[in-house]
């Protein structure tokens, strides 16, 4: 069985920053590092089979579940 890759994308960098800051689990420098890493990671999204935008967690979960269902039913090549 071949792996299927799913990239979970934040709705925007501004929203990702807001989420990280609101969690209050990391200092400002750590948030800056995380945002820089996120930019690098987002540039690699094109290499994934699917991209799911995590705007609302419940919707992202549904999208991922739909991808898994579809992949389970894919005709073997």
Image (spheres, helix red, strand yellow):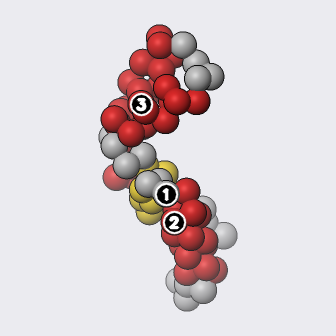
Which residue does the image show at 43% across and 33% down from the upper left?
18
Badge 2 marks a residue whose secondary structure is helix
Badge 3 marks a residue whose secondary structure is helix
Residue 17: which numbered mark, if any?
Answer: 3
Crowd around label 2: few <14 · some 14–19 · many ≥20 (10 Å): few
Residue 44 drawn at (x, y percent): 38, 43
Crowd around label 3: few <14 · some 14–19 · many ≥20 (10 Å): some
Say whether disc 3 or disc 2 marks the residue closer to the N-terminus.
3
Residue 56: which numbered mark, if any?
Answer: 1
Callouts 3 and 2 close, C-beta under 8 Å = no
Which residue does the image show at 42% across and 18% down from the upper left?
32
Crowd around label 1: few <14 · some 14–19 · many ≥20 (10 Å): few
Label 2 sits on residue: 59
Callouts 1 and 3 close, C-beta under 8 Å = no
Q: Does residue 23 appear left or right of residue 7 in this picture?
A: right
Which residue does the image show at 55% across and 76% down from the upper left?
66
Q: Nearer the viewer, residue 49 or 54?
A: 54
């Amino acid at each position: 069985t071949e792996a299927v890759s799913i990239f979970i994308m934040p709705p925007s960098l501004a929203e990702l920053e807001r989420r990280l800051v609101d969690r209050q689990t990391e200092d400002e420098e750590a948030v800056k590092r995380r945002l820089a890493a996120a930019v690098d990671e987002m540039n690699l999204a094109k290499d994934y089979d699917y991209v799911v935008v995590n705007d609302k967690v419940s919707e992202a979960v549904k999208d991922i579940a739909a991808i898994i269902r579809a992949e389970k039913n894919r005709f073997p090549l």
